[in-house]
Amino acid sequence: MPGKTPRETIRLDKWLWHARFFKTRSLAARVVADGKVRVNTERTDKPARAVGQGDVLTFQQGRAVRVVRVLAPGTRRGPAPEAAALYDDLTPEAPATHPREGPRPTKRDRRVMEQWRRTPLE
């Protein structure tokens, strides 16, 4: 098609490394190869999968699930502010944990709570 320029893309593992989600590129490639990354809701296990502007990535980082939209492919692994400009964070806010009231439970209190949890419902 005349007038249509190809979309600028980059390897998925390289982009995750450039955007500083993983410390090394090989770690990013391993996570992708294990099938733990989704690109536009489709699971992928190919580190060489091309991603570009507008793609939405979903992956686990530590205990949190991250959802990010690719804004730019990036050219290098630069400083954090430069890396943050490569994506828009769409990760939903984690629900607030219930604030603990009163002092920390004693060992006896914990035993009572554990016994209560193990009691079957009738």
Image (cartoon, grey):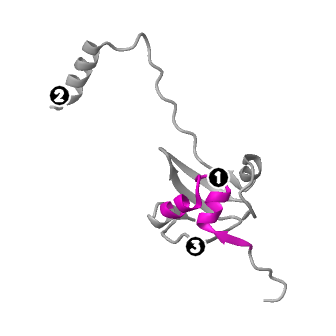
Marks 2 and 1, how far apart at CA: 46 Å
Q: Amino acid at mark 1?
A: Arg
Callout 1: few (<14), some (14-19), or many (20+) C-alpha neighbours within 10 Å?
many
Task: Name the residue at 67% across, 55% down.
Answer: 19
Q: Amino acid at mark 2?
A: Thr
**Closest to the observer: 61 or 100?**
61
Task: Name the residue at 75% across, 64% down.
Answer: 75
Q: Is label 3 in a helix, a strand or a loop?
A: loop
Task: Name the residue at 60% across, 52% down.
Answer: 21
Label drawn at residue 48: 3
Marks 3 and 2, how far apart at CA: 51 Å
Marks 3 and 1, how far apart at CA: 17 Å
Say whether residue 109 is left or right of residue 32. Answer: left
Q: Cβ–Cβ below 8 Å for labels 2 and 1?
A: no
Name the spot of residue 31 as percent of width and height, x first.
Answer: 49, 60
Furthest residue toward bottom: 1
Q: Amino acid at mark 3?
A: Ala
Verify whether residue 25 appears in magenta: yes
Say whether residue 38 is left or right of residue 115. Answer: right
